[in-house]
Image (cartoon, rainbow, N blue to C red):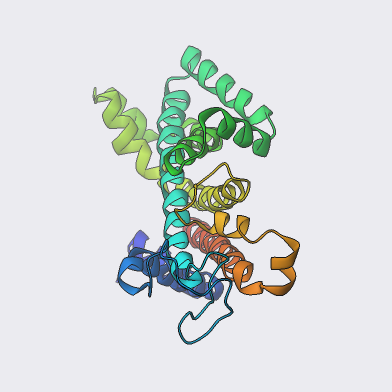
C-alpha cells in the first residue's frame, strides 16, 4: 500500500528516539501548563505564613521569601513562558512567511525593500536589539511577544524567499500562471504547501530562542512583571548569593524547567527536520 507523505514523516519521526521522547515530554509540559489552574495547590500570588520554607508535605517545592508556593508559581510560570514562546513564534513566522512569499515571487522593488529591512535588523547584535526594544516599548507579556515577533521575522523571510525563488520556476507554477490563476492562488495553494515543512522546522528554533529571550528579559526585570509568575522572574527573585547557596529550591526548579523545555523543543525540531529530509531524499 502506498504510504502518504504525512504518514511517512510521522513514521520516520518516531524512529528518532530522542525526538519522540522529547515530544512526549513537551506535550506533558504543555498539558500541565494548560491545566495549571486546576492542579496548582495554591494561587501563584497567595502568601502563606511560611517564608522561604524548604520543600515539605505542605509545599512540595517550598516557598519563596514572601511565602508564595514554588510549585504553583512554577506551573503558572511555565504557562506564561510557553505562551510567550508560541505566540512570538507565531507572529514572527506569519510576518516572515508573508513577506518572504512576496519577496521571492514578485522580486524587483518589493524584494529589494523587504530584504534591505531584513538585512538592517539582522546587522544589529540580536540580544542588544531585543534589550533596546524592550527598554523603548516597556515591560509586559504582550510587549515581549511583539518585540520578539518583530525581531525574529527576518530569518523566516530569508528562508521562505529562497524556497520560493527555487519553486517558482517549477512546471506546476508555470502551468497555473498560463491557466490564468490568481496570484494569491499560486502563492497560497501552489507554493505555500511546498515550503511549509522547512518553515515549521525553522519555527522550532525560533520558539526555543523566544523562550530563552523571555526568561532573560524577565530575569533582568524588562519582561513579565511580578506578581505574575514566569520562569524568568522566578530566577530574578532568587539571584542573591544567600539564596543561591542556601535556598536551591528557589532557583533550581525554574532553571531546570527552562533547560528541559528548550532542549525538548530543539530535539523535536531536529527530529522533524530529519524526518522531512529522509522523506524527500527517499
Question: Residue 102, how many percent across, how many down?
Answer: 42, 25
Task: Give coordinates of residue 9: x percent, y percent.
Answer: 42, 63
Q: Is residue 2 visible?
A: no
Figure quadrant of residue 43 = bottom left
Q: Between residues 146 and 49, which one lies in front from this camera angle?
A: 49
Q: Along the line of sight, which residue is nearer the eye, 99 or 55?
A: 55
Of 124 and 20, the residue lying toward us: 124
Q: Is residue 210 above or below residue 243?
A: above
The residue furthest front is 49
x then y, percent, for residue 67: 51, 68
Q: Count how many numbered circles sit on residues in the image.
A: 0
Whether residue 263 is visible: yes
Placement of 38 over or under 214, stated as above or below = below
**Viewer-closest of 169 and 10:** 10
Quadrant location of residue 28? Answer: bottom left
Residue at the spot 29% in from the left edge and 37% down from the top edge = 189
The quadrant of the rendering that contains the N terminus is bottom left
At 40% from the left and 37% from the top, the residue drawn is 94
Q: Position of residue 93 (x, y in %)?
A: 44, 40
Amino acid at each position: 500500500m502506498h504510504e502518504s507523505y504525512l504518514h511517512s514523516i510521522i513514521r520516520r519521526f518516531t524512529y528518532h528516539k530522542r525526538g519522540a521522547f522529547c515530544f512526549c515530554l513537551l506535550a506533558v509540559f504543555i498539558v500541565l501548563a494548560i491545566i495549571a489552574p486546576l492542579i496548582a495547590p495554591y494561587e501563584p500570588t497567595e502568601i502563606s505564613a511560611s517564608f522561604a520554607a524548604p520543600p515539605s508535605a505542605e509545599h512540595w517545592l517550598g516557598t519563596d521569601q514572601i511565602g508564595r508556593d514554588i510549585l504553583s508559581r512554577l506551573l503558572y510560570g511555565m504557562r506564561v513562558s510557553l505562551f510567550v514562546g508560541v505566540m512570538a513564534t507565531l507572529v514572527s513566522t506569519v510576518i516572515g512567511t508573508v513577506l518572504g512569499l512576496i519577496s521571492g515571487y514578485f522580486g524587483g522593488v518589493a524584494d529589494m525593500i523587504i530584504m534591505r529591512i531584513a538585512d538592517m535588523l539582522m546587522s544589529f547584535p540580536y540580544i542588544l536589539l531585543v534589550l533596546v526594544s524592550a527598554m523603548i516599548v516597556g515591560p509586559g507579556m504582550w510587549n515581549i511577544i511583539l518585540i520578539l515577533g518583530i525581531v525574529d521575522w527576518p530569518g523566516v523571510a530569508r528562508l521562505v524567499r529562497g524556497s520560493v525563488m527555487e519553486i517558482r520556476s517549477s512546471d506546476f507554477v508555470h502551468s497555473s500562471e498560463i491557466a490564468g490563476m490568481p496570484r494569491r492562488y499560486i502563492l497560497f495553494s501552489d507554493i505555500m504547501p511546498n515550503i511549509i515543512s522547512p518553515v515549521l522546522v525553522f519555527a522550532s528554533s525560533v520558539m526555543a530562542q523566544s523562550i530563552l529571550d523571555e526568561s532573560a528579559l524577565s530575569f533582568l526585570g524588562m519582561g513579565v512583571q511580578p506578581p505574575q509568575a514566569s520562569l524568568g522572574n522566578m530566577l530574578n527573585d532568587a539571584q542573591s548569593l544567600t539564596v543561591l547557596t542556601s535556598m536551591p529550591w528557589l532557583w533550581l526548579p525554574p532553571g531546570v524547567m527552562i533547560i528541559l523545555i528548550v532542549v525538548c523543543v530543539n530535539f523535536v525540531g531536529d527530529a522533524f527536520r530529519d524526518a522531512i529530509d529522509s522523506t524527500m531524499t527517499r
